[in-house]
Image (cartoon, helix red, strand yellow):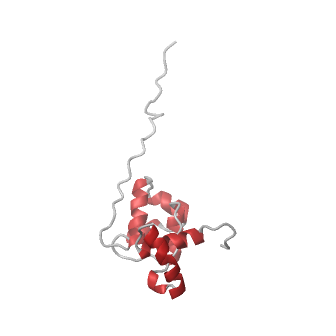
Amino acid sequence: MTAIAKYSRRNPEPRKQRRSTVTIPERASPAVKLVFAEMNRQNKTYDSVEAGSGINRPTVKAWRHKNHPNLESISAVLGFLNFEFVPIPRERALPDSIREALKPIADLLRLEMRDAVGFAFEIAYRQPGRST
């Protein structure tokens, strides 16, 4: 009895998944840079992003140099990459009473006000029972 080769021409060895070669565009918006950085980090291909998010491959590729994504498209792709797209107000958009209440907390934690505002809204966004 002869030994049978594990792989042959009819039964080739499966191809190894190549490391993602997606690069981060220099002059893109921060959200687009995040998409491409995460695609690279998570080793996601354009095809897997298309299948997972429903946004066409050419559309995502065009974000690199030509087009700007709309809110629905960028949210879908970021959702596929396990991110949420949540707007956080800047300090100047807050009422004076909230700014004054956050100032001692920011000082105590040695944070800049923009970071304190970001953390406060992150906490408020993550509260249980929040309507989505």
Tell which residue pokes out farthest to the right in this image. 129
Task: Give the left or right position of residue 49, taking residue 130 as reference.
Answer: left
Task: Give the left or right position of residue 22, taking residue 122 as reference.
Answer: left
Res. 83 in view: yes
Looking at the rendered structure, the number of numbered marks drawn on it comes to: 0
- Residue appearing at x 38%, y 48% in the figure: 19
Which quadrant would residue 27 be assigned to in this image? bottom left
Measured as percent of width and height from the top left, residue 31 is found at: 42, 71
Task: Give the left or right position of residue 30, taking residue 130 as reference.
Answer: left
Measured as percent of width and height from the top left, residue 22 is found at: 36, 58
Nearest to the observer: residue 85 or residue 116: 116
- Residue appearing at x 49%, y 14% in the figure: 2
Measured as percent of width and height from the top left, residue 100 is found at: 50, 82
Which quadrant would residue 66 be assigned to in this image? bottom left
Measured as percent of width and height from the top left, residue 65 is found at: 33, 72
Res. 95 in view: no
Tell which residue pokes out farthest to the top in this image. 1
Q: Quadrant of the C terminus?
A: bottom right
- Residue appearing at x 50%, y 87% in the figure: 96
Nearest to the observer: residue 44 or residue 79: 79
